[in-house]
Amino acid sequence: MKKIIGVAAFAVLGMVALSSCKKDYDCIVDGAAVEGLECIDCKGSEKDAFEVLCTLVGGSVEKK
């Protein structure tokens, strides 16, 4: 029983650590990041808007 609790606690801590990772993105055009066009700590609709903007300039979004 102690092992199950320990494994469960480890799994929960791992999920929390991974979910709190930075969510920073660059807009990549022709293999290079566009200076000044980045999204720091993006979430939800902010990331969606950044993806649309990046697509409009002919780029793609990549995680930093």
Image: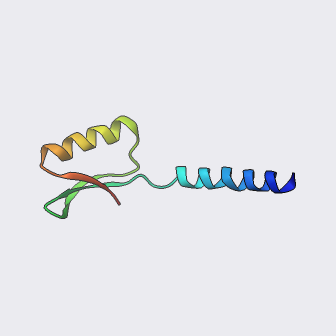
Along the horizontal axis of the image, is 59 left or right of 49?
left
Q: Residue at x 80, y 52 (%)?
A: 4
Looking at the image, which residue sits at the far top? Answer: 45
Counting labels gives 0
Closer to us: 7 or 56: 7
Along the horizontal axis of the image, is 47 left or right of 57?
right
Along the horizontal axis of the image, is 8 left or right of 31?
right
Locate residue 3, reporting x and y percent. Answer: 82, 57
Quadrant assignment, res 30: bottom left
Q: Residue at x 37, y 54 (%)?
A: 24
Q: Residue at x 61, y 50 (%)?
A: 16
Locate residue 29, reporting x and y percent. Answer: 15, 58
Quadrant in which the C terminus appears: bottom left
Locate residue 9, reporting x and y percent. Answer: 74, 52
Q: Residue at x 27, y 43 (%)?
A: 50
User: How is the structure coloured here?
Assistant: rainbow
